[in-house]
Structures are given as structure tokens and as C-alpha cells.
């Protein structure tokens, strides 16, 4: 076992680090060409596989719903005798924290404003555009991304805690490929997972650096350019590498709690200082609009609507790529905290709790931003990374709000990067929960280098290469996610049949299974 572990570790780590190193060198030496070709590939992927991305996300969403209502939902993510490690309130809070991130702060106001000014189907700056802006934003941050996160986390938790596998994505495919997941095939899957994780996290870090720079520029006239963004990335890299090297898990825990407090304060300020009644009305109205149009919006690739087709290239397909590439990172985190939960409980919480958080968050920030822009039109002309601070400027306590936002973004930056170095270290060290510091440092530097290279080659807005990278990396990894769903269903359905889980479970078989499991655990002890 040790020899195999070392071999697997060296292969995945070596291959993944070489691929990332090549991309960093190419992007740094030839930034314009890197941006041009990544943009061209990204455009080709969205044009050719846009329908595929829409179909995959929709099928995964309905598959999760099916799991929740089917007898499979009665299975536990763990042994039948396992109890949840965290109480329900703490567990839901951790799901909430996984749902919060740099993306919500960056796009909280800027995305609804963008859809209001350039809606997918209707005329801009109209009431119809306002309704469409909220519906579109809810689609991007609602059930679909959390279904993808959920299926990755579900497969990982099921095979790790119930079947005794190590926490690698490749091991979740054993019901399909057998022991071949312990060889080159497994290495390929794990390399794809590492690459997707790096791109997904790097996109978030790039977006965070842009917004920190935008806030400093708006408040203190700090130059808003790639040099400043590089300095920001370097400073934050040192901070999270110190944490990763020293293993200050409590420090990261405190920062995570700080994130939730600051995010909660920011939300309450926006709810109270913004158009409160309009926000609350839009929460209910836009939620109803989102739910009634969910199926059509999920599958509409807009082949006959040029306006919406172009809009989808910049928004929906970019998000689907970002969420797909982010799913190994979030999935591993959610799996880790969900041991002992039933699949039904898991699906319900993972789909609903973060979606509700997003609905309230974007309603508060979006409606406040649009109303502020209607009174101060210059806000609509600000770049996305600066827009939030322009909105704060139109509200009472603007300096306090801006400082809270900057601290929150920086804290998200540090905690996301630190957690990502652990996840990447685990994925490249055969699933160990204690990856070596050297490995974590390598991945920490790699994350920051990729984020900087993407910004360097991202054109005038800085977002172009980030969007292209997310879309491209998601394509091969989406195949892994589909296989994970099939593999999980194959094994879980076999388990369901063995236990006689139907509407009324077979109690005799369940008791026999529990006794056998307890006996095996005693033998292992």
C-alpha cells in the first residue's frame, strides 16, 4: 500500500505541476498570445458545447432531486451506525460559508446591474429588464451550481465514509472501472481534478485581486492596473502561505467565522440602508419568476435569439464553467463536514440553503445598486470591480461599508487560497489529510501565479482570460463528474436493493447489515 501510495502521489503531483508550470511560463512570456488563444479556444468551446453544458447541469440537478426523493435517499453518508459529526445548525452554517465567496461580493451588485443595462432578451433599463436581471442572477447562483457541487461531494462522502475509500475523486469510479482506478486511469482523473481546482480557485483569486484594487483605487486613488494587482496577489500569497506552512487551522477557523460576521453585517447594512420594501418584494416576486421559468432557462441554448446567445457566452456558460471547475474544491469541503447525514437530508440542505442565501444576497445588493445607479448614472459606467464602492458612496456610512467590503474580500482571498492548498495537497498525496508543507507551498504559489497570468493576459477588462480559463477547464472535468454520478448511482442502488429500501424498508436486512458492520468495526479495532 505504501509503495502504491508513493507512486500515485509522485505521478499526480508531477504531471499536474508540470502542466501548471508550462501554462504559467507561456502566460508570463507571451501574455498577449496566451490571452488570444485561450479566448479563441473558449469561444470555440461555448459555440460548440454550449448546449452540452446546459444539458449536463440540468440533468445533474434533476438527478440530485431524484436521489432526494427516491429510496436511495435513506442511505447514510457513512456506516449505518455513524452519527453526524456536527450538529444541524453548525452543519448548515458551514454549507452557508461554502456558498459565500469572492464571487458574491464581486458580482453582488455588478451582475444585476449588467443584466439591467444589457438584458438577455428584453429592452435595457426597463421594468422587464429589472425582472430579467434578478431572474438571470438567481439562475447563475441558484440550484444548478449547487447540484454539481452536491453530486461531487455526495460521491466523495459516500465512497470515503461508507465504502472506506481514500478521499480522491478517482476512487469514486471504482464501481465502473474496478481496480484500474489505482493505476494510470486513476492518475488521469486526479490530474484533471487538480487542474480544474487550480483554474476554479485562480479565477476567484483573480476576481478578488481586481476588486481589492478597484476599492483602493476608488477610495485612495491607488493605480488600478496589473502591477498593483500583482502586488496584492503577492502580499496575500505570503499571508496564506504562512498559514499553510504553520498549520494555523484555528486562525483559518477564526477567519472563516469573521467572513460570516462581515458578510452578515454587509447584508444587513444593504437591506436597511437600501430600498428595504422593494428588496423584500423582489425577493418573493423574483423567486417565483425564477422557479416558474426554471426548466426553460435550464435548457435554453438560444439558437434562434442572437441577443440572448451572445449574452449567454459572457454569462451563463462562463458561470457553468467556473462552477464545474470549482466543484472538486467545494465538493471535498462539503463531503468532509457531512459524514453521518442521510443522502436525502444532504440533498435538501445543499440545494436549498445556499440558494436561499444567494436569493437574499443578490436581491439586497442588486436592487440597492440599480436604484443607486438610477439616481447617480455614473455608477453604471464604473468597471465591475469598482461598482460596489461607487454604490456605497451613495449610501450613509459609505467609508465603513467600503472598509468592511475590502476586509471581507481579503479574508475570503486568504481562506479560499489556504483551503485550496490543503485540497490540492490532499489530491496529490493519495488523499492524506496531512499533506507535506512543501506540497502546499508549491500549490499555493501555483495558484497565485496562474491568477496573475490570467489577469496579465485578460485584455482591458482583465476578465476575458479568467472567463476563458473557466470554460475550457470545465469541459474535460465535466466527463469526470458525469462518471462520478453514474458510479455513485450504480453502487448506491445495489446497496438499496440489498437493504430492501423501498417506501417501507426491510428491517430484517437493515439489522443484519448493522450487525455485520459493527462486527467488522470490532475486528478492525
Image (tube, rainbow, N blue to C red):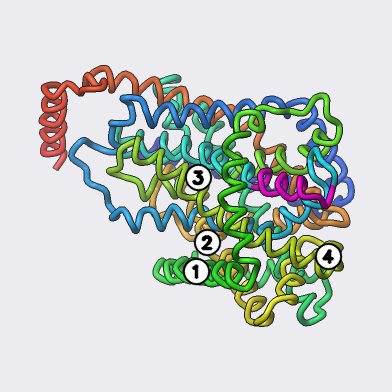
For discs 2 and 4, the disc positioned in front in the rendered view: 4
At 60% from the left and 63% from the top, the residue drawn is 277
Q: Which one is nearer the viewer's eye here, 248 or 497?
A: 497
Residue 425 percent location from the top left of the image: 49, 51
Q: Which residues are magenta?
A: 124-137
* Residues at marks 3 and 1 touching, judged by CB atoms closer than 8 Å: no
Calculate the distance from the C-alpha at mark 1 to the C-alpha at mark 4. Answer: 35 Å
Q: Earlier in the sequence, mark 2 or mark 4?
A: 4
68 sits left or right of 441 in the view: left
Residue behind mark 2? 418
Q: Earlier in the sequence, mark 2 or mark 3?
A: 2
At 15% from the left and 21% from the top, the residue drawn is 509
Callout 4: few (<14), some (14-19), or many (20+) C-alpha neighbours within 10 Å? some
Residue 32 percent location from the top left of the image: 89, 50
Calculate the distance from the C-alpha at mark 4 to the C-alpha at mark 3. Answer: 41 Å
For discs 3 and 1, the disc positioned in front in the rendered view: 1
Residue behind mark 3? 428
Residue 226 percent location from the top left of the image: 81, 65
Label 4: element kind:
loop
* Residues at marks 1 and 2 touching, judged by CB atoms closer than 8 Å: yes
Residue behind mark 4? 382
351 sits left or right of 460 in the view: left
Indicate whether 408 appears above or below 319.
Answer: below
Does residue 128 show up magenta in the picture?
yes
Amino acid at each position: 500500500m505504501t509503495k502504491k501510495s508513493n507512486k500515485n502521489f509522485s505521478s499526480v503531483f508531477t504531471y499536474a505541476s508540470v502542466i501548471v508550470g508550462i501554462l504559467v511560463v507561456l502566460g508570463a512570456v507571451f501574455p498577449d498570445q496566451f490571452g488570444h488563444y485561450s479566448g479563441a479556444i473558449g469561444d470555440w468551446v461555448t459555440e460548440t458545447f454550449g448546449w452540452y453544458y446546459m444539458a449536463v447541469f440540468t440533468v445533474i440537478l434533476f438527478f440530485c432531486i431524484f436521489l432526494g426523493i427516491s429510496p436511495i435517499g435513506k442511505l447514510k453518508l457513512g456506516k449505518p451506525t455513524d452519527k453526524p459529526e456536527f450538529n444541524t445548525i453548525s452543519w448548515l452554517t458551514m454549507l452557508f460559508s461554502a456558498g459565500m465567496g469572492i464571487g458574491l461580493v464581486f458580482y453582488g451588485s455588478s451582475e444585476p446591474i449588467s443584466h439591467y443595462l444589457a438584458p438577455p432578451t428584453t429592452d435595457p433599463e426597463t421594468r422587464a429588464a429589472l425582472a430579467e436581471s434578478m431572474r438571470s442572477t438567481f439562475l447563475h447562483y441558484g440550484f444548478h451550481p449547487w447540484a454539481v457541487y452536491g453530486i461531487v461531494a455526495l460521491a466523495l462522502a459516500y465512497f470515503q465514509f461508507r465504502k472506506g475509500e481514500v478521499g480522491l475523486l478517482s476512487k469514486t469510479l471504482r464501481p465502473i472501472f474496478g481496480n484500474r482506478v489505482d493505476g494510470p486511469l486513476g492518475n488521469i482523473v486526479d490530474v484533471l481534478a487538480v487542474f480544474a481546482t487550480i483554474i476554479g480557485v485562480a479565477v476567484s483569486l483573480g476576481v478578488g485581486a481586481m476588486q481589492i484594487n478597484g476599492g483602493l483605487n476608488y477610495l485612495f486613488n491607488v493605480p488600478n492596473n496589473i502591477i498593483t494587482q500583482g502586488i496584492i496577489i503577492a502580499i496575500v500569497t505570503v499571508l496564506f502561505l504562512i498559514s499553510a506552512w504553520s498549520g494555523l487551522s484555528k486562525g483559518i477557523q477564526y477567519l472563516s467565522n469573521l467572513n460570516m460576521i462581515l458578510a452578515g453585517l454587509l447584508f444587513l447594512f444593504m437591506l436597511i440602508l437600501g430600498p428595504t420594501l422593494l428588496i423584500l418584494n423582489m425577493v418573493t416576486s423574483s423567486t417565483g419568476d425564477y422557479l416558474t421559468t426554471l426548466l426553460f432557462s435550464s435548457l435554453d441554448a438560444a439558437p434562434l435569439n442572437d441577443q440572448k446567445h451572445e449574452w449567454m457566452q459572457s454569462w451563463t456558460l462562463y458561470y457553468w464553467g467556473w462552477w464545474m471547475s470549482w466543484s472538486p474544491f467545494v465538493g471535498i469541503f462539503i463531503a468532509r463536514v457531512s459524514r453521518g447525514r442521510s443522502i436525502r437530508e444532504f440533498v435538501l440542505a445543499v440545494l436549498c440553503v445556499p440558494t436561499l442565501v444567494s436569493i437574499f444576497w443578490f436581491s439586497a445588493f442588486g436592487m440597492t445598486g440599480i436604484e443607486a445607479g438610477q439616481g447617480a448614472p455614473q455608477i453604471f459606467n464604473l468597471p465591475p470591480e469598482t461598482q460596489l464602492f461607487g454604490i456605497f458612496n451613495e449610501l450613509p456610512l459609505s467609508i465603513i461599508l467600503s472598509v468592511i467590503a475590502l476586509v471581507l474580500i481579503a479574508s475570503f482571498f486568504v481562506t479560499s487560497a489556504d483551503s485550496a492548498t490543503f485540497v490540492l495537497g490532499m489530491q496529490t498525496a493519495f488523499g492524506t489529510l496531512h499533506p507535506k508543507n512543501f506540497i502546499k507551498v508549491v500549490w499555493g504559489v501555483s495558484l497565485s501565479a496562474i491568477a496573475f497570468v490570467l489577469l496579465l493576459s485578460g485584455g482591458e477588462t482583465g476578465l476575458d482570460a479568467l472567463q476563458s480559463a473557466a470554460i475550457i477547464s470545465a469541459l474535460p472535468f465535466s466527463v469526470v463528474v458525469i462518471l462520478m454520478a453514474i458510479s455513485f448511482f450504480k453502487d448506491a442502488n445495489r446497496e438499496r436493493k440489498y437493504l430492501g429500501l423501498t417506501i417501507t424498508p426491510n428491517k430484517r436486512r437493515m439489522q443484519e447489515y448493522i450487525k455485520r458492520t459493527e462486527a467488522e468495526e470490532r475486528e478492525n479495532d
